[in-house]
Image (cartoon, rainbow, N blue to C red):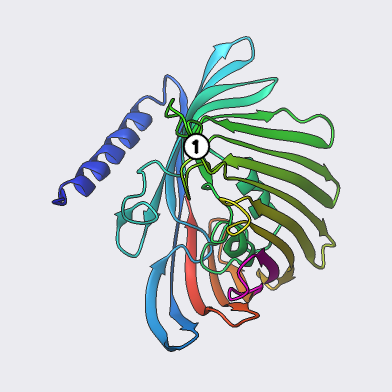
């Protein structure tokens, strides 16, 4: 199929027009433009059994956080009720390109409209998932897809589904004391035909608790993957994640335990992955020393595939201001027992929030 070379220009023009409309309509409703620009320079080295190591020098996007631009706003409807909207697009700063990768949806981070009131906030569209929010909250590398161990073992690992889900309804319930609930239901592909008519249908939820220096959450995801390996295979995946943090002032400690069970198309393709993550953020000067380690056991029927995965990161995040920070990170990821692919990343970068 011939590429449409004008498509990126059209997408950028659409974003510019949307931003202009948001700015000119500020008198009628509250609207803000915000985002993150993150870029780094460094080296990435990969190794695989039976193959020579490959290294490359990189100037890339999103070392600490995936770059994006967003527009959000609200309109007062009276009686304590507001109409709300949110549009967020990922960016690749190194290439000036839209999306996390070629072919990514333009508003892939979120595209939702809904209501906000005393009950909390309810939105419809492509919503950020509660499971993703819980994953990033309880590890010191948060949502880094380049040097974050827990993200590597989850969203760059066996977990099905994205950080946001299409065709979804999300309810962020108003807090009740120390407790808060976050629920999402996605209709998935909903082809309306059998077999596998509900492929992609998902339920995603998290319950959060916060009291003083202690915070914790329990998150759950269930997603219908029927027909993704073989027609009418009945495949599905269930995952749950327990996370907690404690702020000692001298250091903030993080811990997570996760279990991802994938039924596959039968015993031969079933997979169960159990993961531990421990981390810390230690204040030092104008920034924080960040360290995180994640370890997974991979249980499947194939004796030739690795049974363990270990990943660690250590580095320093230096705050130049409330909006801007510099970082230097060393990341190491390895599959083993038997030995599998390894990756090492050295990254020095800058992140700016606006």
Q: Which residues are magenta?
A: 291-309
Q: Nearer the viewer, residue 312 or 334?
A: 334
Left or right for 341, reference 255? left
Residue 11: horizontal and vertical position, in percent?
26, 43
Which residue: 36% across, 44% down?
105
Q: Is residue 235 magenta?
A: no
Which residue: 41% across, 85% down?
55
Q: Nearer the viewer, residue 23 or 129?
A: 129
Residue 139: horizontal and vertical position, in percent?
69, 60
Q: Nearer the viewer, residue 266 or 58?
A: 266
Query: For residue 289, which quarter of the picture?
Result: bottom right
For residue 156, above or below residue 327: above
Which residue: 58% across, 73% down?
305
For the question of whether residue 73 can be seen, the reply is: no
Query: For residue 37, which quarter of the picture?
Result: bottom left
Residue 275: horizontal and vertical position, in percent?
71, 63
Pick out the residue farthest to the top: 79
For residue 136, above or below residue 95: above
For the question of whether residue 144 can be seen, the reply is: yes
Left or right for 242, reference 12? right
Q: Is residue 303 magenta?
A: yes
| Residue at image mark 1 | 199
Type of secondary structure dominating the magenta stretch: strand
For residue 294, above or below residue 74: below
Left or right for 214, reference 300? right
For residue 320, above or below residue 26: below
At label 1, counting other C-alpha atoms closer than 10 Å, the crowd grade (few under 14, some 14-19, many 20 or more) is: many
Residue 346: horizontal and vertical position, in percent?
51, 80
**Number of numbered markers:** 1
Q: Regarding mark 1 in the picture, which secondary structure is present there?
A: loop
């Amino acid at each position: 199929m011939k590429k449409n070379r004008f498509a990126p220009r059209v997408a950028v023009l659409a974003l510019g027009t949307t931003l202009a409309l948001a700015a000119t309509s500020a008198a009628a409703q509250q609207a803000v433009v915000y985002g993150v620009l993150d870029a780094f320079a460094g080296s990435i080295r990969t190794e695989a059994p039976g193959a020579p190591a490959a290294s490359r020098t990189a100037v890339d996007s999103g070392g600490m956080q995936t770059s994006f631009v967003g527009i959000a706003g609200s309109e007062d409807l009276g009686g304590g009720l507001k109409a709300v909207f949110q549009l967020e697009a990922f960016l690749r700063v190194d290439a000036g390109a839209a999306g996390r990768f070629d072919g990514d949806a333009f508003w892939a981070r979120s595209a939702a409209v809904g209501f906000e009131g005393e009950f909390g906030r309810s939105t419809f569209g492509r919503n950020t998932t509660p499971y993703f929010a819980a994953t990033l909250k309880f590890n010191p590398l948060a949502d880094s897809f380049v040097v974050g161990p827990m993200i590597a073992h989850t969203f760059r690992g066996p977990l099905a589904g994205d950080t946001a889900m299409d065709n979804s309804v999300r309810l962020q319930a108003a807090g009740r004391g120390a407790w808060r609930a976050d629920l999402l239901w996605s209709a998935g592909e909903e082809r309306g035909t059998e077999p596998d008519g509900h492929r992609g249908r998902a339920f995603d939820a998290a319950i959060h608790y916060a009291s003083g220096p202690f915070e914790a959450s329990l998150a759950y995801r269930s997603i219908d993957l029927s027909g993704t390996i073989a027609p009418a295979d009945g495949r599905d995946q269930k995952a749950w994640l327990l996370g907690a943090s404690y702020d000692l002032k001298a250091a903030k400690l993080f811990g997570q335990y996760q279990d991802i069970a994938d039924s596959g198309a039968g015993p031969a393709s079933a997979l169960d992955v159990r993961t531990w993550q421990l981390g810390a953020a230690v204040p030092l000067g104008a920034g924080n020393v960040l360290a995180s380690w994640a370890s997974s056991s991979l249980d499947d029927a194939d004796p030739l595939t690795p049974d363990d995965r270990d990943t660690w990161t250590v580095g320093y995040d230096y705050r130049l201001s409330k909006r801007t920070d510099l970082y230097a990170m060393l990341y190491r990821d390895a599959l083993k027992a038997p030995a599998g692919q390894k990756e090492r990343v050295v990254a020095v970068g800058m992140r700016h929030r606006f």
